[in-house]
Amino acid sequence: MKRDKPPRLEGVTTIFDSVGGLEWFTSLVERFYEGVATDPILRPMYPEDLASSVPNTAGFLAQYFGGGSQYYSDERGHPRLRVRHAPFPIDQAARDAWLGHMLNAVRSGGLSPENEEVMVEYFERSSQFLVNIEPEDNRRRIIVKAAEPSEGS
Ligand code: HEM
């Protein structure tokens, strides 16, 4: 069922509005992926065709910064970012690499200083939240699915 656009508050300008809508978030993510494309830690985690990953992340960010649920959740449901990132081994180095590329993309986005500060803080915080390997654990996590004991064994 297609939901109506959620009501917008009178007189409230969101970051989504002030940066120019979905288009801005799409080019942000495209710039970010230019960095990912050559990153030895991050590149192997992403699909071969990076362009296929742009709409989900751009849409999520457009929604998060006030655009409305039609940009992500109407299609993809609740973001559950920790769960969606669980298959990827995100240690501190991976997070720092991810954040570095994203901050380069944010800082070349022509934002007002206020909007830039909000985004920088948001990406610092949210990327740290997605670390799923203990800092002192130098191993890349290997997910081994335990074999079901076969009958009679
Ligand atoms: C901390 C380092 C991070 C790494 C290594 C990472 C890695 C990834 C990878 C490999 C994918 C799958 C891409 C695909 O299959 O198309 C993905 C998807 C995604 N990431 Fe991240 N990510 C990180 C942080 C973040 C942060 C901070 C956010 C949001 C603020 C974010 C938002 C998303 C979204 C929205 C998706 C798509 C989810 C969906 O399937 O709907 N990621 N990420």
Image: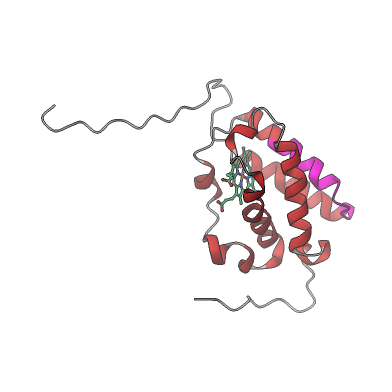
Quarter of the figure with residue 101: top right
The dominant secondary structure in magenta is helix
Left or right of residue 6, residue 30 in this image: right
Q: Which colour scheme is used?
A: secondary structure
Q: Is residue 120 above or below residue 91?
A: below
Q: In this view, does 63 lie above or below 47?
A: below
Q: Residue at (76%, 79%) from the top-left corner?
A: 10
Q: Where is residue 152 in the image (x, y as percent from the top left)?
A: 10, 30
Q: Residue at (75%, 46%) from the top-left corner?
A: 121
Foreground of the two, 105 or 95 = 105
Q: In the image, is residue 106 part of the stretch drawn in magenta? A: yes
Left or right of residue 144, residue 10 in this image: right
Tally of marks: 0
Foreground of the two, 97 or 34 = 34
Quarter of the figure with residue 55: bottom right
- Quarter the C terminus occupies: top left
Q: Give the range drawn in magenta.
A: 98-113
Q: Where is residue 30 in the image (x, y as percent from the top left)?
A: 74, 48
Q: In this view, does 122 lie above or below 136?
A: below
Q: In the image, is residue 127 part of the stretch drawn in magenta? A: no
Q: Position of residue 9 (x, y in %)?
A: 72, 76
Q: Position of residue 22 (x, y in %)?
A: 74, 62
Residue reaching furthest to the left: 152
Q: In this view, does 140 lie above or below 6?
A: above
Q: Residue at (54%, 32%) from the top-left corner?
A: 89
Tell me which image quadrant ligand 1 sits in: top right
Foreground of the two, 66 or 140 = 140
